[in-house]
Structure formats: structure tokens, C-alpha cells
Image (tube, grey):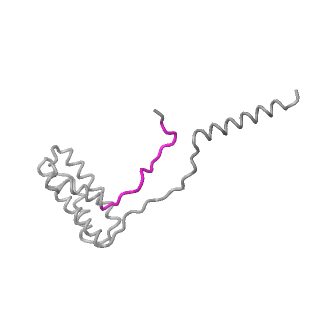
Amino acid sequence: MRLPLIFRRDPGPQRDRTVAAAETVALVLAEDSPLPESFGDVEELVLRLRGHISQLGAVVPPGGSALHSAQQLASVSVPDGLLPGRVHLVKLAEATQTLIATAHTHGVVPAKTMRRRRWWKPQHNVLRGSVFAVVIACLVLAASAPR
């Protein structure tokens, strides 16, 4: 297996923030989604929702009641215990859902992808041919030099 020499950080087009947040909210609030089985699952979902709230906070106009209540709820730590944690998770998901609706009503445009300049990537045969041409030129130059 050949590993790439250059590490690419650009995974492709960036997803819309509201779509990603709506998917996480659906994991929590959809009727067919399973309940989190452990406290660690609750914490993971809470962290994801907090991240979505912070990302949507940059998109939604500041000073809104939905943003303020969602940020307040996100700043509260997860209560100990599975059942209180689930209740907090549902409240946070509902606040995120309200924030998504606020973002849609204010006409948030999806995040644009940043286009980077792509350099021409030569194929292996082109590289081999150019190395061969340089080697032949060096041999001809060395053979024509006086002794």
C-alpha cells in the first residue's frame, strides 16, 4: 500500500452548520432514535450539541432570546446520573432546535467552501521521463568533456 507524501486536511466541501446540528438534534429527539445507554453517551451528545450551539451562535444575529437561552443551557454542566443527564440532553436538543429555526428564519446562507489553488500534479511516467532526460543530458555532457 502506498501512503501519500502530503497530508490533506481538506476533506471536501464543508457541510452546512444547520444541517449538521439538525442531524444531532434528530439523534436525540426523533421517536425512532434509541435512548443513550450510558452516562458517557449522554456526555458525548451534550458536547456535540454545545459545539453546534457555539457554531450557530456565530451565524444567528446576536441578542436573540433563543441564542441566549441556548448558551445558558449549554454552559450548565451535565447533572450526575443517567436520568437527569437525559433530561438535560433533551432540553439542550430542544434549545438547539429553536436556534436552528431562528437561523433559518433569518436566512442564513450555507457555509461556502474555500477554494484553494490546485497545482498541477504530474503523473509518475512524466516524472520518470524527466529524470531519464536529465540523466542522458548529464551523460552526454560528461562524455563530451575533454580528458
Quadrant into which the N terminus falls: top left
| Residue 86 rendering spot, x and y as whole percentages | 15, 52
Q: In the image, is 64 to the left or to the right of 37?
A: right
- From the image, which quarter does the C terminus lie in? top right
The image quadrant of residue 75 is bottom left
> In the displayed image of the protein, which residue is found farthest to the top?
147
Image side of residue 80 versus residue 134, left or right: left
**Please, which residue is most extreme toward the left here?**
83
**Residue in front for this viewpoint, 136 or 99:** 136
Quadrant of the image occupied by residue 102: bottom left
Please, is residue 107 above or below residue 52 in the view?
below
Q: Position of residue 129 (x, y in %)?
A: 65, 38
Q: Residue at coordinates 48% horizontally, 36% vertically from top-left?
A: 3
Which residue shows up at 24% across the image and 71% down it? 65
In-front residue for pair 70/112: 112
- Kindly identify the residue that appears in the image at 54 percent across and 53 percent down: 118
**x and y percent of residue 61 in the render?**
33, 71
Answer above or below: position of 121 versus 25: above
Which contiguous range is marked in magenta? 3-18
Q: Nearer the viewer, residue 11 or 89?
A: 11
